[in-house]
Amino acid sequence: MSDVGPAVAGRTASVLIVDDDADNREVLGEVLSDAGYSVVFARDGAEALALLRGLRPDVILLDLNMPIMDGLEFRAAQRRDPALARIPTVVMTALDHFRQWIGELAPTEMVAKPLKLAQLLSIVRRYAQAS
């Protein structure tokens, strides 16, 4: 792991991973931490919104299919809040029919599961640097 992670305005770039699957959170967290990012986790959209009251990550990685508050509901709430709407949000989903929600989600980007970790790292790097 690098001693100095990807920097944004002199600080380590941060990523919020919103996924109900513990294995997905663990793998993504490890990959991003090893790449030097500060990583925060949420198990569903409601938990993510609560975290965002005091946290402004550089990028959000969002699963769609979650209990309590799914990715569609989270995105709707995020987009209603001007401060949160500006955070780049990458939607990750295994759902084959996710493209039907592109207009409603208005994601920064969408990636299909199973994830290609090199591709995901490239996406996170691009949006974290643009923050």
Image (cartoon, rainbow, N blue to C red):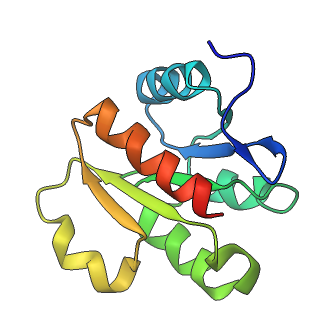
Picture coordinates of residue 50, whole percent (x, y): 77, 57
Picture coordinates of residue 99, whole percent (x, y): 18, 71
Q: Is residue 79 above or below residue 55?
A: below
- Which residue is located at x 28 percent, y 78 percent? 102
* Left or right of 18 on screen, residue 112: left
**Of 64 and 116, the residue lying toward us:** 116
Q: Is residue 12 above or below residue 36?
A: below
Q: Is residue 14 above or below residue 26?
A: below
Q: Quadrant of residue 39?
A: top right
Q: Is residue 26 above or below residue 115?
A: above
- Which residue is located at x 30 percent, y 40 percent? 119
Q: Pick the quarter of the image with the N terminus.
A: top right
* Left or right of 84 on screen, residue 63: left
Q: Pick the quarter of the image with the C terminus.
A: bottom right
Judge whether residue 110 can be spotted in this image: yes
Toward the left, the furthest residue is 96
- Which residue is located at x 48 percent, y 23 percent? 31
Judge whether residue 67 can be spotted in this image: no
**Of 10 and 56, the residue lying toward us:** 10
**Of 35 and 55, the residue lying toward us:** 35
Toward the top, the furthest residue is 1
Q: Number of marks in the image?
A: 0
Q: Quadrant of residue 114?
A: top left
- Which residue is located at x 65 percent, y 16 percent? 2
Picture coordinates of residue 64, whole percent (x, y): 37, 57
Picture coordinates of residue 117, whole percent (x, y): 33, 31
